[in-house]
Amino acid sequence: MKKILLLFTFLFSVSLFSQQLYWYDVILEVNGEDTVEFENAVDAYYSSVDFPEDVTMSFSSIPIKGMGYEDTHILSFVSPSSQSLANLRASLAGEEWEKYVDIVRPFTDNVRASTGVVPLVYNAEEFYGIGQVWGFRVKSRDIPVFANAFSKLMETFDSPGFVGLTQVTHGISNGENLLVYGTYPDLNSAFTFGPKNDSESQAFGEFFNVTAEISEFTQSWTRLLIKAYN
């Protein structure tokens, strides 16, 4: 019986995380005095890249974050096609790429990358320039439970912008494997984020009741779009 339940959980997880969106993030810590030169170098290089039609990249700063989070910038590549995303990443090579890396390397103290999939998407057309990330550690067997609770929450909660539940598949830090990402049309919407009525408050309460025993909240940070490329 236990093996059957484990198999069901695995199959449900595979079904739940079927192809939706794929992402590849490069997250950097840039020296404060080099910010302008770094941002200009990134823009100059990626403005010359021939992006596939189904791949977009957003270049953002990270101005709001908790203590101990030192990263300052993020380059996010997103596509509904894993192959297109892989092809673009493979194309970032050659002489011009090496010149770009040589320019930006002295400006950075740390660089890391992660990838994943976004199985649950809401308000896909309302993708704004201010984005907030909430990170969670969830045991693999409990991911379907967390996702179901999140899906139920979103049946009631009226988000001001895009919302996605994403699973980190590569580049996991300290076990953080699920991210909730939401965007806002302006700072006021970001500052006032949360339930707006009794129904939404109850929905959030139910979500936290279900996920409290199976997940650990790790961190939250907010990014601000510098420029988008496609």
Image: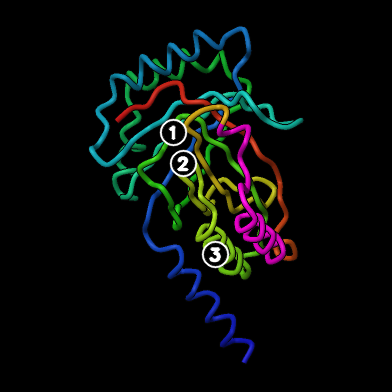
- The residue located at (48%, 50%) in the rendering is 164
Cβ–Cβ below 8 Å for labels 3 and 2? no
Crowd rating for badge 2 (residues with CA inside 10 Å; few <14, some 14–19, many 20+): some
Helix, strand or loop under label 2: loop
Magenta span includes 113: no
| Residue 166 appears in the rendering | no
User: In 3D space, how far apart are the residues under numbered discs 1 and 3 (Cα atoms)?
Assistant: 23 Å
User: Cα distance, mark 1 to mark 2?
Assistant: 7 Å
Quarter of the image containing the N terminus? bottom right
User: What is the CA distance from the residue labelled 3 to the residue labelled 2?
Assistant: 17 Å
Q: Do residues under tags 1 and 2 come within 8 Å of each other at their CB atoms?
A: yes
As drawn, is 158 to the left or to the right of 127? Answer: right
Pick whichever, 39 or 144, lies toward us: 144
User: How many residues crowd around disc 1 within 10 Å: few (fewer than 14), some, or many (20 or more)?
Assistant: some
Q: Position of residue 23 (x, y in %)?
A: 43, 44
Which of 162/181 is in front? 162
Residue at image coords 71%, 46%: 218
Dividing the picture into quarters, in which one does residue 106 lie?
A: top right
Which of the marked residues, 1 or 3, is nearer the chain's N terminus?
1
Q: Main secondary structure of the magenta part?
A: helix
Q: Position of residue 54 (x, y in %)?
A: 27, 42
The residue under the point 47% across, 32% down is 185
Find the magenta span and give its range: 189-211
Which numbered disc flags the more N-terminal residue, 1 or 2? 1
Q: Which amino acid type corresponds to the residue marked 3 in the rendered image?
A: Lys
* Residue at image mark 1: 128
Q: Is residue 74 visible?
A: yes
Residue 19 location (% of width, % of height): 37, 59
Q: Pointer 2: what residue?
A: 161
Please give the residue where the numbered disc 3 appears in the rendered image.
152
Instruction: Name the quadrant containing residue 15.
Output: bottom left
Q: Is residue 89 left or right of residue 32?
A: left
